[in-house]
Image (tube, rainbow, N blue to C red):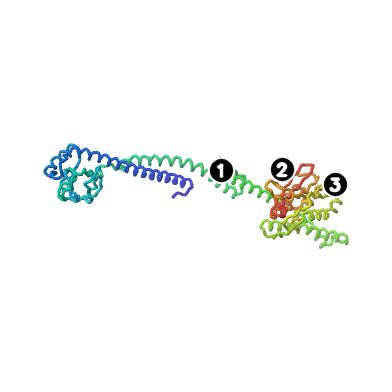
Amino acid sequence: MFRTLRHKLIVSYVLIALLSLLLSGSAAAWLLQNSQEESAVRSLRILALSVSVRLPRLPQRQVTLTFLLPRLRQEAADAGVRLVVLTANGQVLADTDTSSNLQGEQIPFALRTDLRRPDVRRRQVKGQDLFFVVLPLGARARPAPPDQPSFVALVVPAADIVDTWLELAPSLLLALALALVVCIAVGGILSRAITRPLEEMTHASQAIAAGDYEQKIATSGNDEVGRLAEAFNHMALEVHRARKTQRDFLANVSHDLKTPLTSIQGFSQALLDGSADSPEDRQRAARIIHQESERMNRLVGELLELSRLESGQIPFRQDHVDVGNRLQHCAEKFRPQAEQGHVDLQIDLQASELAITGDADRLDQVLTNLVDNALRYTPAGGQVLLRGNRERTAQNETWVVIRVSDTGKGISPDDLPHVFERFYRVDRARTKEGGTGLGLAIAREIVQTMGGYIAAQSQLHQGTTFTVRLPAAE
């Protein structure tokens, strides 16, 4: 019946309001009814005392029904009340009300002659719910015989004490009707404020599913719905970026694959048709085919490795790793490449103890990628510096910090936030030198798996610094 969230919210508001009014009205009616009964009982006691004062105070032996009944009828008529005469065991001897006379009935309660104030009892007699306000008759020198008049009672039907529910029913129904109208109006406004962003998210989600990724929802407030809208906008932006990155990657990978495939196809055709007839030409064709196949193999290998890293399929050893030794080993490995490019490669270990718990081979992979990039983009006469240090944070955490700095051309502010994204390449024109754009993404996955993080800082025409922070070994 209620298929939309808005209708469900409105109905819930209405039900809560009606239930609250019903419970509060019932509690108020019960309290008022008890209070009214107590007030009525007090009034009955006062009326009974007033009647008793006007009755003759004769000795008990002189209180006879013949003597008493005319006076009771007169008093009942004057006061507008109903009086009955009772024996000591509760039998009705006379009743001033002739319409529903109780004479001869046995009232089921015990009576005492030492009453200091009117005794109020509520009993069911002949199908009637009655209040009895009981007073002793005559002097209390000694108990009267069981069949003689001993008490007079003021009798009032319980129905005469106003039923509070009946009085409050019209007002309560009116309040319920007004509350229903107000709740529907307020519930409609509130539910609209809640469901409108959700409806917008639904439409935006459908648009994204259809391929339109430029979706944004207007956010207002800092409540759960507002935060959900902000999270949706962030998600939509990330999806848009991911799709754009994937499109760029497909274009780059297609180009990277097409180039070596074209070379392999051309030189293999030259070998097949005999156009490469000299030994030198055949050697050159075979060498190019080998180089291009290695390049394709490297591209596929990096794609598979990144996928396995992201899915957690590559196990990491937890060994004691001396970071200083790994930095020195990396510097020695790249020193011939640095000398060939006339780049000054230096290492600076600012702490004697640079140890972490992790995988030494994976750390070498990160350092290799960072140093190779630094040397590749540093011109002749420049410098690449490898630094290692220990730093303690304000939270008393100790980190081993590795910095790889170069004096190359730097990275533009537009490209810097994206350097660790998959398939992203800063210099798209330098395909062969720039690689596949997966190296830094792989390095980030490795560092994060080892419990650290990696960041980049750069200024155009001044250089770039990559910083790796890893938890120090205990």
**Residue at (27%, 40%) from the top-left corner?**
42
User: Residue flagged by tag 3: what amino acid is it?
Assistant: Ala
Of residues 47 and 222, the one nearer the viewer is 47
Q: Quadrant of residue 312?
A: bottom right
Give the Cα separation between the discs numbered 3 and 2. 26 Å
Q: For mark 1, what is the residue?
A: 226
Per the rendering, the mark at residue 345 is: none
Q: Residues within 10 Å of mark 3 (few under 14, many from 20)?
A: some
- In the rendered image, residue 96, in percent from the top left (x then y), is placed at 16, 43
**Looking at the image, is mark 2 or mark 1 earlier in the sequence?**
1
Q: For mark 2, what is the residue?
A: 414
Q: Is residue 417 left or right of residue 131?
A: right
Q: Secondary structure at mark 2?
A: loop
Q: Secondary structure at mark 1?
A: helix
**Looking at the image, is mark 1 or mark 3 earlier in the sequence?**
1
User: Residue flagged by tag 1: what amino acid is it?
Assistant: Gly
Of residues 123 and 91, the one nearer the viewer is 91
Q: Secondary structure at mark 3?
A: loop
**In the rendered image, the vertical position of residue 357 relative to residue 94, given as above or below:** below
Give the Cα separation between the discs numbered 2 and 1. 30 Å
Q: For mark 3, what is the residue?
A: 380
Q: Residues within 10 Å of mark 2 (few under 14, many from 20)?
A: few
Note whether residue 265 is visible.
Answer: no
Q: Is residue 96 left or right of residue 326?
A: left
Is the C terminus in the top left, top right, bottom left or bottom right quadrant?
bottom right
Of residues 270 and 321, the one nearer the viewer is 321
**Residue at (66%, 57%) from the top-left corner?**
311
